[in-house]
Image: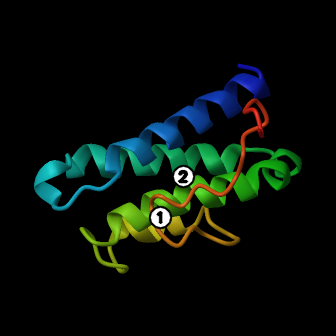
Amino acid sequence: MNTHAQIYEFASSVGSFEGYVYKKISTDELDMDALLSWTNNIVAAYQLIPEAILQQIQPLCDQTVGRAVKSLLPVLNESHEIIKKLGTMIVGEVPKHPDDFKKTKWFENEN
């Protein structure tokens, strides 16, 4: 699989993860086994991204994974295994809350 396809798969998995955990209020709303497996898979994919590419996408990753963490913190505590694993993919600034979307996407009309 070429690098572009790998990046697409990683980004779509992380984006889907963010959507799945968004505004959940209890672990009853989450499949915790699947969530741990999903977390392990996206962390493994992240670790395989070439450094040169990672430098370009890291701020975007920080935002997406950061919003997912912000959604999960009311349900899981900071010391939870999933939160810790997600934290390994964050190196920069994270959003203040799960609804914090600062960036206009390259394909959006800025008007």
Residue at 44% over, 48% down: 18
Left or right side of 100 for 8: right
Residue at the far left in the pictured view: 28
Total numbered labels: 2
Q: CA distance from mark 2 to mark 1?
A: 7 Å
Task: List the residue tagged with mark 2.
Answer: 43
Residue 94 in picture, x, y percent from top left: 60, 69
Task: List the residue tagged with mark 1.
Answer: 85
Left or right side of 31 for 60: right
Q: Quadrant of residue 105?
A: top right
Query: Circle 1 sits in a helix, a strand or a loop, which is it?
Result: helix
Residue 35 in picture, x, y percent from top left: 31, 48
**Front residue of 14 and 46:** 14
Residue at 37% over, 62% down: 71
Residue 101 in picture, x, y percent from top left: 59, 55
Residue at 75% over, 33% down: 109
Residue at 83% over, 45% down: 53
Residue at the far top in the pictured view: 1
Q: Is label 2 in contact with label 1 (beta carbons under 8 Å)?
A: yes
Q: Quadrant of the N terminus?
A: top right
Assess disc 1: are there few (<14), some (14-19) or many (≥20) residues with their C-alpha within 10 Å of its C-alpha. some
**Front residue of 65 and 38:** 65
Q: Quadrant of the C terminus?
A: top right
Assess disc 2: are there few (<14), some (14-19) or many (≥20) residues with their C-alpha within 10 Å of its C-alpha. some
**Mark number displayed over residue 99:** none
N-term mark: 2 or 1: 2
As displayed, is residue 22 above or below residue 77?
above
